[in-house]
């Protein structure tokens, strides 16, 4: 690992029973970067994220964060090391209030960092307005803000964001992407899985394109935006 590489996957293989979902991918994320993983449905994006968090176990390969091998650790240890995961589908606790959901994000900490809570409310003022409301009464976009806010409560060094724009009104997508930029601006490294390729590449420094469990393309955001393959497959442009 070179000095500024914070996170590295090498030759990762993941299977569901006899079906290979991830077929030997390698990627790296440097400290302070926003890196995006693009790909169609079923390409293996969410599987990759869940394997990093150890919600799924790797069949082969290595996942390292700050030089520490993650593949043999339980999920809660991953959070303690400094990786937080905002999952696809948001997964908020609908019968708890907004603030109770946020507090659960700090479960690995001995006490809640009030500064972090204030920062989350600064990023997402709607959450502060609705802090006593049950999370189940929030709109999809507000629940997405809550999921991201909750994942920040453990003060992560690296944030995994899985499909933050899924099923959300375009105006809120824009707001959420602006806040992801602000989160990165505070020094949090971001690994972003996103179907909205254009929005993701405008935000990210670099990207990887997953295709049926393999990395088909990689490069800077500018390179991927200019790539004919990416334009055809994800940006709806034809020759």
Image (cartoon, grey):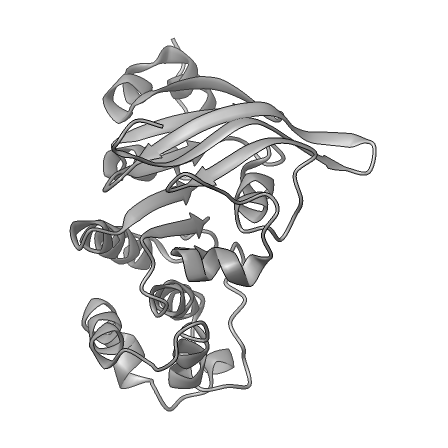
Identify which residue is drawn at 31% across, 64% down. 155
Q: Is residue 85 above or below residue 36?
A: below
Question: Quarter of the image holding residue 101?
Answer: bottom left
Left/right placement of residue 185 relative to residue 87 reads left
> Furthest residue to the top?
239
Percent x, y for residue 235?
38, 26
For the residue pair 169 and 115, the one nearer the viewer reads as 115
For the residue pair 20 and 163, the one nearer the viewer reads as 20
Is residue 97 in view? Answer: yes
> Furthest residue to the right?
18
Q: For the N terminus, give its image quadrant.
A: top left
Percent x, y for residue 107?
46, 75
Is residue 165 in view? Answer: no
For the residue pair 130 and 26, the one nearer the viewer reads as 26
Percent x, y for residue 130?
33, 84
Identify which residue is drawn at 47% across, 51% down. 166
Q: For the C terminus, give its image quadrant.
A: top left
Left/right placement of residue 42 relative to residue 79 reads right
Question: Quarter of the image holding residue 3?
Answer: top left
Q: Is residue 89 above or below residue 158?
A: below
Percent x, y for residue 188?
26, 52
How many marks the image carries: the answer is: 0
> Furthest residue to the front?
68
Identify which residue is drawn at 18% across, 54% down. 182
Question: Quarter of the image holding residue 82?
Answer: bottom left
């Amino acid at each position: 690992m070179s000095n500024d590489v914070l996170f590295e996957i090498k030759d990762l293989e993941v299977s569901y029973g006899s079906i290979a979902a991830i077929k030997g991918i390698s990627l790296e994320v440097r400290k302070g970067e926003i890196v995006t993983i693009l790909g169609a449905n079923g390409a293996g994006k969410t599987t990759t994220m869940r394997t990093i968090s150890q919600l799924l176990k790797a069949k082969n390969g290595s996942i390292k964060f700050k030089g520490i091998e993650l593949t043999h650790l339980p999920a809660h240890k991953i959070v303690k090391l400094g990786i937080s995961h905002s999952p696809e589908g948001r997964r908020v606790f609908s019968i708890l209030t907004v603030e109770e959901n946020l507090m659960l994000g700090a479960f690995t900490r001995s006490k809640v960092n009030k500064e972090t809570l204030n920062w989350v409310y600064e990023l997402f003022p709607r959450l502060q307005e609705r802090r006593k409301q049950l999370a189940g009464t929030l709109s999809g976009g507000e629940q997405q803000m809550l999921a991201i806010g909750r994942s920040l409560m453990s003060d992560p060094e690296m944030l995994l964001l899985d499909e933050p724009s899924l099923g959300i009104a375009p105006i809120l997508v824009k707001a959420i992407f602006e806040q992801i930029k602000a989160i990165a601006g505070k020094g949090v490294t971001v690994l972003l899985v996103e179907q909205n390729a254009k929005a993701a590449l405008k935000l990210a420094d670099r990207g990887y394109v997953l295709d049926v469990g393999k990395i088909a393309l990689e490069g800077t955001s500018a390179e991927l935006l200019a790539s004919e393959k990416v334009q055809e497959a994800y940006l709806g442009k034809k020759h």
